[in-house]
């Protein structure tokens, strides 16, 4: 029989040794794959913003996750208290660095060969977090594609 | 300890961490070393995280790829 459990998954935070967040995520998978632990975890999230912790997605209880932590090198303890995926979901859809920039926005390039030049935004690729700009004072408007975090907004340019 | 920062490559299409020169899932060589956040999928069938990220196979992934 298939297990009928359809409960929403829980999220627990595990404290890790400093700078070993990704190692702990790999070690959890290893512990489960090799059968060193029979605790079931479905995914481990390691957001860069969260220093010293990893988030495990599981259908198991806190004491079971505590058992798992004992088998995982560099994992130190489980934070008492669970959360739902909806509360940590924002880590899964990181805010694009191009947000706040739209067509017509005037930006200053802060990196690359045109550093210091002002430019008008012509196109935005939110998925790739890239924007295409044309240099403001250039006689020949050549489109340049740069990363969203390589510009600084000078003027929103939304005056109609 | 020496700060040896290994440049780990990920697939630009499926975000999977790639060991060789091409992604075993997509077959693409469109890889990136510029990525952030890390995700290990263990049981994609029961993982809401995997569903949300549209991941069907267990493995190691980047949360964000440039
Ligand atoms: Zn791929």
Image: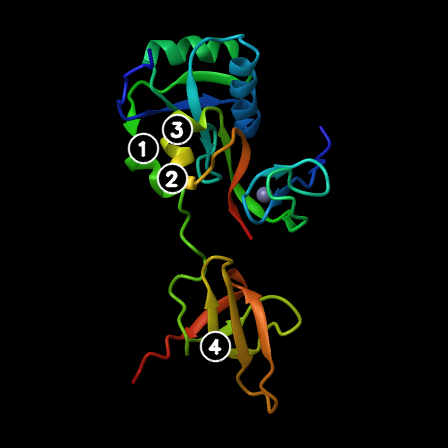
Tell me how far mark 2 sits from mark 3, CA to CA: 9 Å
Between disc 1 and disc 3, the foreground one is 3
Residue occupied by mark 3: B47
Chain that bears disc 1? A
Residue occupied by mark 2: B52
Instruction: Please give the label number shown on residue A65.
Output: none
- Label 2 and label 4 in one chain: no
Between disc 4 and disc 3, the foreground one is 3
Q: On screen, B24 above or below A94?
A: above
Of mark 2 and mark 3, the one earlier in the sequence is 3
Residue occupied by mark 4: A122
- Label 2 and label 1 in one chain: no
Whether the residues at callouts 2 and 3 have beta carbons within 8 Å, the answer is no
Tell me how far mark 4 sits from mark 1, CA to CA: 37 Å
Q: On screen, A119 above or below B26?
A: below
What is the quadrant of the N terminus of chain A in the image?
top left
Residue A90 image point, x, y percent:
35, 43
Q: Quadrant of ligand 1?
A: top right
CB at disc 2 and ligand 1 closer than 8 Å: no
Between disc 2 and disc 1, the foreground one is 2
Residue occupied by mark 1: A85
Residue A96 image point, x, y percent:
43, 55
Density class for disc 2 (Cα within 10 Å; few <14, some 14-19, many ≥20) is few
Identify which residue is drawn at 47% across, 75% down: A121
- Label 1 and label 3 in one chain: no
Chain that bears disc 4? A
Residue A136 image point, x, y percent:
53, 84
Of mark 4 and mark 1, the one earlier in the sequence is 1
Mark 3: secondary structure: loop
Whether the residues at callouts 2 and 1 have beta carbons within 8 Å, the answer is yes
- Name the residue nearer the viewer: A61 or A78: A61
């Amino acid at each position: 029989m298939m297990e009928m459990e359809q409960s929403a998954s829980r999220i627990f935070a595990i404290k890790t040794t400093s700078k070993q967040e990704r190692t702990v995520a790999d070690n959890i998978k290893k512990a489960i794959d090799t059968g060193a632990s029979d605790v079931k975890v479905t995914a481990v999230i390691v957001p860069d913003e969260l220093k010293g912790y990893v988030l495990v997605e599981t259908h198991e209880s806190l004491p079971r996750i505590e058992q798992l932590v004992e088998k995982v090198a560099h994992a130190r303890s489980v934070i008492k208290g669970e959360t739902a995926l909806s509360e940590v979901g924002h880590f899964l859809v990181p805010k694009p660095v191009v947000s706040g920039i739209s067509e017509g926005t005037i930006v200053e390039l802060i990196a690359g060969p045109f550093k210091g030049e002002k430019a008008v935004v012509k196109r935005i690729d939110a998925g790739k977090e890239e924007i295409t700009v044309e240099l403001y004072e250039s006689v020949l408007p050549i489109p340049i594609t740069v990363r969203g975090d390589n510009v600084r907004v000078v003027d929103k340019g939304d005056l109609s | 300890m020496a700060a040896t920062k290994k440049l780990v490559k990920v697939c630009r299409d499926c975000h999977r961490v790639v060991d060789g020169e091409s992604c075993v899932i997509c077959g693409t060589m469109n890889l990136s070393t510029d990525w952030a956040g890390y995700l290990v999928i263990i049981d994609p069938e029961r993982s809401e995280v995997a569903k949300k990220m549209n991941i069907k196979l267990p493995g190691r992934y980047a949360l964000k790829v440039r």
